[in-house]
Image (cartoon, rainbow, N blue to C red):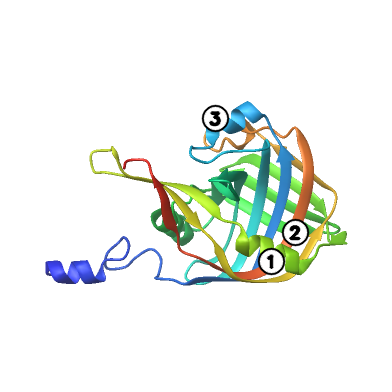
Amino acid sequence: MDIRTIREQAFAMPFTNPAFPVGPYRFIDREFFIVTYRTDPDKLRALVPEPLEIREPLVHYEFIRMPDSTGFGDYTESGQVIPVTFRGVAGNYTHAMYLNDHPPIAGGRELWGFPKKLASPSLKVHIDTLVGELDYGPVRVATATMGYKHKPLDAMATGYGLANTPNFLLKIIPHVDGTPRICELVRYHLKDVTVKGAWTGPAALSLFPHALAPVADLPVLEVIEARHIVADLTLGLGEVVFDYLG
């Protein structure tokens, strides 16, 4: 195999059989369960990287069910997203993500810089309750509940928010000597969003300490709201907005 072939065909690892395909990455019937809660402001500031800023000590705890996603398959993820601002524009910073499928772990980390780790999240309806659970190995890490479809939300406004809110990631890829080779703040957007339904209702969230899944480091002081959303969307590729090594 010559150098030119490698340069032209290299996309992701492994070279001859990448862990995930070339996009675009389209999601059908993507189901969100998002519980927004108030947390300790000092602990939150310690985890949000500059030049991002926080205005309120809020966290979105998310469960996302993805039954049909291009190249990534059928999987579920869970984690924490923090409302931030970047140069005065409001957005969201993804702090932690846990999921049960290798291709989106590899693709999410390598392409965008999603902070993804392998775990066992689930999102399901139990009689009259929407239930999100996250286990890391045999240990329960998070449990969220919400009254199922108690009150509808405006689908158009929900879709506008999803499509027009920038999302931020801290992408880190090490050099062969263990030092950072890439350390960047990445921004991406959700595109071609169609909201099929959106609801709110009474909700509760419990987080439990774990050494390798420390979601409880941002403690739940007060649940503010909960949202349940079903949508089709495309996960847009990112752009570098700040280079920590530059």
Disc on the earlier residue, 3 or 1: 3
Q: Position of residue 159 (x, y in %)?
A: 69, 66
Compare residues 72 and 83 and report the one nearer the observer: 83
Mark 2 nearby-residue class (10 Å; few <14, some 14–19, many ≥20): many
Q: CB under 8 Å between callouts 1 and 2?
A: no
Q: CB under 8 Å between callouts 3 and 2?
A: no
Q: Amino acid at mark 1?
A: Gly
The image's mark for residue 159 is 1
Question: Quadrant where the N terminus lies?
Answer: bottom left
Which residue is the site of mark 2?
Answer: 228
- 8 up-or-down from 222: above or below: below
Question: Quadrant where the C terminus lies?
Answer: top left
| Quarter occupied by residue 77 | bottom right
The image's mark for residue 46 is 3
Q: Amino acid at mark 3?
A: Ala
Q: Position of residue 49 (x, y in %)?
A: 49, 37
